[in-house]
Image (tube, rainbow, N blue to C red):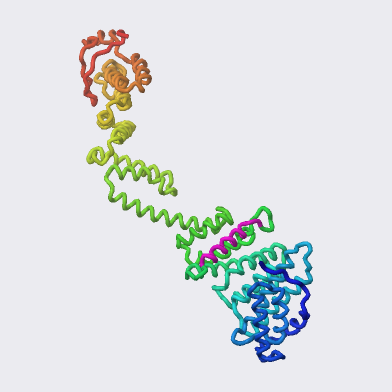
Amino acid sequence: MKKMFKFGTALSLSVLFSTSGIAQCESWEAYPKGKDAAETQHVIYRGYFNNKEYDKAFPVWEELFQHVKSPAPAPRRHFKDGIKMFQERIKVEMAKKDAMDKEKKDADLKMMINLYDQMAGCTGEKATDRAYQGYYMNRFKADPLEQLKVMNKAIELGGNEVHHVIFSPYLNISVWLYQTGKEGFDAEYIRNMHGKFKKIVEHNVTNKTKNAAKYEEKWAKWEQKFKARGKDPKKSLENEVFGCDYYVEQYTPLHEADPQNENQNKEFMKMLKVKCGTENELYKKMAEINQKIADDRERKEFEKLFAEACAYEKGRLLDRKHLLFKEMTEEEKNAAKEEAKKYYKDALDNDPDCIPEEKKADIAYSTGYDLYRAGSYSSARKYLRQASKFRPNWGKPYMLVGTMYAASGKRCDTDASDGVGTGPHAQVVVWVAMDEWSKAKSVDPSVAGEANSKISKYKAYLPTKGEVFQKDLGWKEGASYKVGCWIQQSTKVRLRSTY
């Protein structure tokens, strides 16, 4: 266990402080009692020191150090031992907390700092010494600006491989000075500091230096600090320091130098979205460029797929084209859909194997329906019959064929003497229409309601027995009859009095 110091040494510390302005680098020969006596004193204090009996080691070291500061062949030994003992003295005093003698603590701290400076003067500057000096100055609550001065010296000496021990103290002091509004410690200072240490970490990680993992660990703690609360309780330090304006200022020249760089734009947009929102002008500018790049790429991919696709797949691509190309106008969307229908029809006619089995009925019905709407009843029926073949238990194709038959009175009237589409020769189309609607509900109960409704409605359009008799048509109820015209379908006679 470490021995507690007995404060108040035989010699005044002022003797040691008196040399602070000039580096004294004497070796053994400077000791008044001679070299042998000096070496003996060295052995005595080192024995106590190695046993951590610092209260016994200190006065012997102190007396020797007045004369012999940098002995050969270990010119740094007396400095380092003295630094260590002053550190232990400070720890003891600070452990007293409320009972701490601040004057004693500050005097020892001043001496520790002085020893680092004297050691540098005698043996040369070393980055690690300055790093640890800054670390202990922070731990022992030295003046914050003096701490930073020392740690900046360590960075100057050590460059990207400065010791990671300064990370936490440097960060904590800098953030505190920023948050307390100390002049010179503004957002720009924090940004520069952040960038400087990020570069140090990246160097060590990239080059896999001995303590690369330590640098990463320290950096992770830094990042947590930046994402913590800032001066404004509603904002993090990161948001305060790296706000929207900063990123716009940084990204604008880079973007303008290479505006078509899609990956760079994506990277910038990610940060701008967080810092500035999607309504930011720079964000919208990059988003528009990237959208055009993506559209051009998708268009080329679309054209390649389209060229290699079978007729059905061509139709599918055209049907979904508007999902890929959001900028399409309504006119372009409609044109694509119309073109898709042509490819579906072509697939049915020339390459049905290209169409998935579960889609054939739908494609055939859709093609038939479009032809029906265009007035091409005969062609429409061809595809509706295909739909029924592909899906036998589907009533819709039969329902639509029945609708076309019922609407063909004027087309198929063979005797217009009583007005086109109004006499019994026109009304015969209702017979085949009813056949279709009856077939529809027989194969598909889901359309039974609609089919019954149409059958009931069109009963009123059946020829009457009186009309048949007056015109001497010779039609007998239930007799076979073939409806001509484009229909060319056999049925049975139905007269209105029957119902």
| Residues in magenta, as a range | 212-229
The residue drawn where x is 30% and y is 44% is 313
Q: In the shown orientation, is residue 27 left or right of residue 471?
A: right
Task: Give the image quarter of residue 1.
Answer: bottom right
Image location of residue 490, percent across then percent down: 21, 19
Image location of residue 59, percent across then percent down: 73, 79
Q: In the shown orientation, is residue 359 left or right of residue 124?
A: left
The quarter of the rendered structure image containing the C terminus is top left
Q: Nearer the viewer, residue 371 or 346?
A: 346
Viewer can see residue 457 = yes
Q: Nearer the viewer, residue 153 or 463?
A: 153
The residue drawn where x is 29% and y is 40% is 344
Is 220 covered by the magenta stretch? yes
Residue 408 higher or lower than 166, as above or below: above
Image location of residue 234, percent across then percent down: 66, 53
Task: Give the image quarter of residue 404.
Answer: top left
Residue 332 higher or lower than 62, as above or below: above
Image location of residue 342, percent across then percent down: 30, 41
Task: Give the image quarter of residue 459.
Answer: top left
